[in-house]
Image: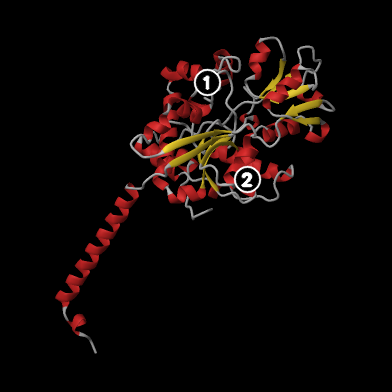
């Protein structure tokens, strides 16, 4: 038997129209709800490095410029939201601990400590390349007779273990027929390592471009730098977010990434190069001349926020290296860790989709449109992955 509703086409039509209208209203409500997302009262942003200089400053990378310029606060000036910026002398491991204890929401972090945290179950999302492709330097005392990396065998060498310099250093050692076991490794933080080298307590020190200032003062010699060598010997970094925060505040997360993309674009422009170097230079620590030497004439490639095949490849290498060096107990897939959705939205909104050139797995520019499209695959995410 057919009921009266099934017999009446007019009733069916009206019902369909009502259902359609209700679905439209629901969709519009969801859209308005997303647009009206209220940011949290406090956004906690961490840096895996202490402030330096007198007075203490932090200007490094894209995030350092956005912090120094006040551009995060500018974006949220009409919201009842404050920023809390934290700077960790304990570097990457300290940031992992802060994420674990739910003390921070975003962090500027290195690849190795983040990989160790991820392997241990820490749930974050990689959002933005920051301080990526940073050079490493190997310094020795002015009177040292060492002439090559291969001659480090049996020598007392310092670097900061657990930070993003450890894996490229190990890669460099391996290319020269060495491992950490062939050295007398002394694990010191950046400041302590420099003091140990200047005091003659160690034979060599791996560090960053700040060693160039001491070189110019005649206090040490640079035995090796990745500057001009293969980019596989560079250090990688990023901005990532607590997964729970990104799930609860997707619009806030998008706005944070938008600030970073705008800052990276500003810093990449040739007309802003002088101001960028001036911002990054901290008297007594970094000079504009050493920064110019390290970064070269074009800042664009170092400001690139893209998780391109080169950067993804480096993170995959770090996952394997961390297991090999017994720094983590398991491996994991890198791609599900990366959430490109927020950056892609910012690039599209700012019309910067093609501003930066992605690099292939070997660090070479990808120039064809088809290759560029393949270099930035869409990431399908599920919660807490």
Give the structural element (helix, strand or loop) at label 2: helix
Counting from the top left corner in percent of width and height, residue 87 is at 57, 32
Residue 362, label in figure: none
Q: Which residue is mark 2?
A: 117
Under tag 1, what secondary structure? helix
The picture places residue 114, in percent across and down from the top left corner, at 61, 42
Which residue in the rendered view is the most extreme toward the left?
10
173 and 343: which one is in front? 343
Q: 10 Å neighbourhood of mark 1: few (<14), some, or many (≥20)? A: many
Q: Residue at x 20, y 67 (%)?
A: 18
Q: Residues within 10 Å of mark 2 (few under 14, many from 20)?
A: many
Q: Quadrant of the N terminus?
A: bottom left
Identify the mark nearer the N-term, 1 or 2.
2
Measured in 3D between alpha carbons, the distance from the residue under mark 1 to the one under mark 2, in whole angstroms, is: 29 Å
Q: x, y percentage for residue 186?
A: 78, 30
**Which residue is at the front of the view, 182 or 84?**
84
Q: Position of residue 254 (x, y in %)?
A: 41, 42
Can residue 327 be seen? yes
Q: Nearer the viewer, residue 7 or 195?
A: 195
Instruction: Describe the colour scheme in one phrase.
Output: secondary structure
- One can see residue 112 in this view: no
Residue 280 numbered mark, or none: 1
Q: At 76% from the left edge and 24% from the top edge, which residue is drawn?
A: 149
| Number of callouts | 2
């Amino acid at each position: 038997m057919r009921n009266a509703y099934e017999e009446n086409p007019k009733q069916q039509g009206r019902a369909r129209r009502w259902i359609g209208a209700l679905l439209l209203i629901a969709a519009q409500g969801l859209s308005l709800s997303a647009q009206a997302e209220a940011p949290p009262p406090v956004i906690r942003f961490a840096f895996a490095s202490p402030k330096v200089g007198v007075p203490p400053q932090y200007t490094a990378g894209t995030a350092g410029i956005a912090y120094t310029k006040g551009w995060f606060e500018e974006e949220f000036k009409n919201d009842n939201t404050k920023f809390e910026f934290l700077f960790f002398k304990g570097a990457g491991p300290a940031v992992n601990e802060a994420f674990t204890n739910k003390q921070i929401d975003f962090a500027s972090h290195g690849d190795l400590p983040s990989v160790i945290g991820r392997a241990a179950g820490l749930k974050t999302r990689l959002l933005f390349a920051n301080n990526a492709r940073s050079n490493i330097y190997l310094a020795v005392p002015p009177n040292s007779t060492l002439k090559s990396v291969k001659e480090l065998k049996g020598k007392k060498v310092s670097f900061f273990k657990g930070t993003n310099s450890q894996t490229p250093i190990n890669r460099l050692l391996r290319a020269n027929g060495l491992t950490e076991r062939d050295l007398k490794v002394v694990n010191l933080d950046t400041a302590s390592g420099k003091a140990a080298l200047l005091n003659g307590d160690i034979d060599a020190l791996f560090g960053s471009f700040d060693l160039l200032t001491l070189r110019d003062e005649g206090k040490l010699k640079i035995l090796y730098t990745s500057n001009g060598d293969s980019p596989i010997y560079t250090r990688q970094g990023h901005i990532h977010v607590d997964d729970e925060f990104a799930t609860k505040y997707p619009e806030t997360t998008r706005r944070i990434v938008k600030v970073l993309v705008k800052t990276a674009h500003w810093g990449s422009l040739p007309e802003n190069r002088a101001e960028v170097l001036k911002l990054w230079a901290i008297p007594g620590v970094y000079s504009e001349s050493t920064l110019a030497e390290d970064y070269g004439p074009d800042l664009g490639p170092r400001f690139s926020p893209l998780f391109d095949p080169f950067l993804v490849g480096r993170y995959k290498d770090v996952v394997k290296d961390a297991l090999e060096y017994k720094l983590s107990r398991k491996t994991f897939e890198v791609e599900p860790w990366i959430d490109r959705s927020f950056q892609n939205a910012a690039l599209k909104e700012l019309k910067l989709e093609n501003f930066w050139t992605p690099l292939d797995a070997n660090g070479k520019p990808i120039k064809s449109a088809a290759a560029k499209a393949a270099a930035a695959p869409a990431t399908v995410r599920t919660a807490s992955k």
